[in-house]
Amino acid sequence: MTTVLKLGGSVVTEKDTRETVDDDALTTAAGIVGEWMGGDGSGSPPLVLVHGGGSFGHPAAAAHGVSATEGSRDAAALVAVHRAMGRLNERVVTALQAAGVAALPVRPLSLVDRTDEAVNCPAEPVESMLDEGFSPVLHGDVVVHREKGGTVLSGDGLVVALADALDADRIGVCSTVPGVLDDDGEVVTEIPSYGAVADLVGESESTDVTGGMAGKIRALLDTEQPAAIFGLDGLATFLETGQAGTTVR
Amino acid sequence: MTTVLKLGGSVVTEKDTRETVDDDALTTAAGIVGEWMGGDGSGSPPLVLVHGGGSFGHPAAAAHGVSATEGSRDAAALVAVHRAMGRLNERVVTALQAAGVAALPVRPLSLVDRTDEAVNCPAEPVESMLDEGFSPVLHGDVVVHREKGGTVLSGDGLVVALADALDADRIGVCSTVPGVLDDDGEVVTEIPSYGAVADLVGESESTDVTGGMAGKIRALLDTEQPAAIFGLDGLATFLETGQAGTTVR
């Protein structure tokens, strides 16, 4: 049973302080994943991790004029964003390894390309890592966008593409909120369609270049797999049961 | 006409001083490539670059017990070698960009996997970069090796796999020697088979973990494309004419 798990950029970084990891949150998340995987990695359940950009990716993209929709042909600008994400990816991989996870970095710029309509993510390299007992760790990144040069592919967009390419069984999105909240501040346990929650999540007004909660839900509704959105408190429960926070079907 | 160009690790690094770039040689090589590509990158001929490990990759591989044949399942060891190569790759990409080449990094660990018999290199991400006017820059790296965990894939091995995957038109290997030398110290201009030069290059006795000149020639004889082996002095001629130093057919 293959799991694709997103660790939100706002979970693993201090989102308001440039290029700063939230060490406590990252260590906690890595520890929960390591515990679930059984410590020594032998017989680990297949797990693909994806992390967002947080205070590494988003400011770099803004500073270098690279976005999710407008392409750039400036290789130096694209590489500046990619390197910022690489610095965060190193920290995440190291934290996971320290927690006993056989984590290996996978850089989307090296693997993925896209068009306006679709993201092309070859499954083989990631599947080989899983088959050999490793846990690939991907991230939101700049990728080549046909006819446009390069654009930002969000962690959420990558989760959807990966889950499809790998025919994964379940998707988890670990966020800073415990799920989608209703007007009384209670977690909505299940979302069958975007219309059902449009008034709760509204349009994306966030400065997050890649979409916020509205974009997350739209993307997850497109997947074959059930997808859960939960906070760090729900991570262990999600890994054990596949259910935590809000489930998008 | 697609060219795959290898910049030897011994060309771009000081091979005897750990993790030290040979700035003069790298700047010279990058300048020649940039000149050939026409400066502003518009209408650039498709060029894929690969660099070796030099004083970055080889000592790291030796220190962490990772080799081209014995697999490792130690994710931290594999990542240590991969990061050492990443540091060199950053320097090479930056030097090429400074010379006007729209260089983008491609990390083989993210893209390639292998078996004892074959290297599997999906062509699409690299082709998309070329189609969009970028020059991908790959390198010798650790990659997932089915049934073995991870092993070192040499820059030479990657050149052969890439040339095949991309159906490239020509291969250039820029080395520290002007070509394969005969007993009188003259460059052998053409090698039709390994037997023809076995006594000149001998068996590989080098400390280079990935094969030296003998391994280079064996690998290049397997390719469909003509492959030229030349020194930095021959790089401009190779790019212009496809012929320099020793040509292996």
Image: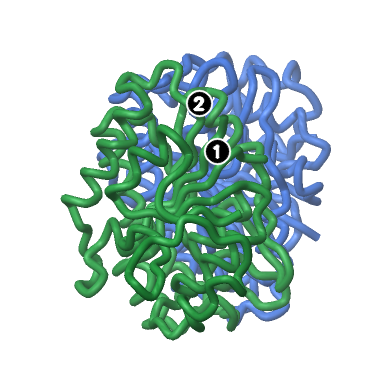
Chain colours: A green, B blue
Which is more toward the observer, B76 or A2? A2
Indicate the amino acid at tag 1.
Answer: Gly
Please report, as a chain letter, where disc 2 is located.
Answer: B
Q: Which residue is mark 2?
A: B210
Q: Quadrant of the N terminus of chain A?
A: top right
Q: Quadrant of the C terminus of chain A?
A: bottom right
Q: Which residue is found at the position 76% from the left and 49% from the top?
A: B166
Q: Is residue B209 left or right of residue B227?
A: left
Pointer 2: residues within 10 angstroms few (<14), some, or many (20+)?
many
Label 1 close to label 2 by CB (< 8 Å): yes
Occupied quadrant, residue B79: top left
Instruction: Relative to A23, say whether A125 is above or below.
Output: above
Q: Which residue is found at the position 56% from the left and 14% from the top?
A: B203
Q: Is residue B189 left or right of residue A18?
A: right
Query: Marks 1 and 2, how far apart in space?
Result: 8 Å
Pointer 1: residues within 10 angstroms few (<14), some, or many (20+)?
many
The x, y position of residue B57, in whole percent, is: 38, 36
Q: Which residue is mark 1?
A: B155
Can residue B181 be seen in the rendering of this structure?
no
Please report, as a chain letter, where disc 1 is located.
Answer: B
The x, y position of residue B87, in whole percent, is: 35, 50
Instruction: Relative to B17, say whether A101 is above or below.
Output: above
